Image: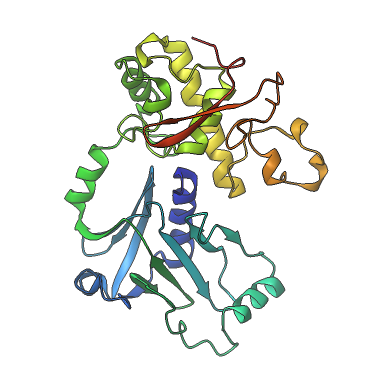
Amino acid sequence: MPEGHSVHRLARQFSDIFSGQRLAVSSPQGRFTDGAALLNDRTLVASVAHGKHLFLHFDHGLVLHVHLGLYGAWDFGGDATFRGASSIGAPRKVGEQEVFDDGAAADAAFESAGGSSGYEGPPAPVGAVRVRLAGAHGWADLRGATTCHAITEAEADAVLARLGPDPLRNLAGGKEGFVAGVRARRTPLAALLMDQKVIAGVGNVYRAEILFRQGLDPWLPGRSLDAEAAGGLWEDTVAMMSDGVRDGRIITTPPTYWTDPAAGLPAPDESHFVYRRHGLECRNCGTAVAMTDLAARKLYWCPVCQQGT
């Protein structure tokens, strides 16, 4: 499932390419026909991410609410002026690919998507496109999302009220709310970090890496964590997820752990401390990384490095 950094990149993408435009909204697949009719020919005025939820606000007070879930993904395309991600979504199906910012590369990406210098709109939809948004210079297609609804501003506020603070929004009281929420629970930290009512946007990768970087026992009850340690957990989450927004990938190891730091971002097998490294040596102590199931998800940790309380 795409984690919070990807959804924030989506919000930025929509803001950059569609904000202020009157959009054609349709449902080629047919499963969102009524909702598309409510949003069609309206102007996008704001694009907001909170945790794993995306809210596209239109000028008549309605909002397109999307949660990608395990299989959802957005695909983007457009003319030679179009910039940004070509796709963002479920890593196992689409992944996230950045097009280059120079004109020649953008033109090449445009041509490969079936475009031409005489742009006349998006191509025919391919596959089960739940929603298509089309503007003056590009389009966005949504497939496979768990949630896709046209809702009111009040309904959007109600969704937000059920979610915990988002480390990437930097809203007032976010850190304090997280610290209080964690320290009020007997639940193990590894479960609390996946609870979107406690902290919004953290998924399985960030969960494992945050706990390792803070040296925390995954089974430590939240109420056993003192306020300073809980605050440090929040701050490190902010830092890691902010890096994810910048890089378009979850990279939690510093350059000192990479084979060739000068080459840019590390290879995937050098990007994480413990996630999907069960049975391999811990990068810090050499102990075999452990794995178990917790709340139907794989949990990875180092039994030696993560004994902190």
Relative to residue 151, is residue 106 drawn left or right? right
Answer above or below: position of 252 versus 11.
above
Name the foreground residue: 133 vs 224. Answer: 224
Place of residue 90 in the rendered image (x, y in percent of width and height, measured from the top left)? 47, 55
Residue 62 seen by the camera: no
Name the foreground residue: 139 vs 16. Answer: 139
Q: Image point 37% across, 73% down: which residue?
A: 128
Place of residue 93 in the rendered image (x, y in percent of width and height, measured from the top left)? 50, 60
Look at the image and name its color scheme: rainbow
Relative to residue 26, is residue 116 drawn left or right? right
Place of residue 206 in the rendered image (x, y in percent of width and height, measured from the top left)? 51, 35
Relative to residue 159, is residue 98 drawn left or right? right
Place of residue 124 in the rendered image (x, y in percent of width and height, measured from the top left)? 43, 84
Kindly indicate the quadrant of the structure image that contains residue 183: top left
Answer above or below: position of 235 versus 110.
above
Answer above or below: position of 79 versus 234.
below
Residue 47 seen by the camera: yes
Name the foreground residue: 6 vs 91. Answer: 91
Relative to residue 141, is residue 115 drawn left or right? right
Q: Image point 72% across, 46% down: which residue?
A: 267
Q: Image point 25% across, 71% down: which residue?
A: 31
Total numbered circles:
0
Kindly indicate the quadrant of the structure image that contains residue 151: bottom left
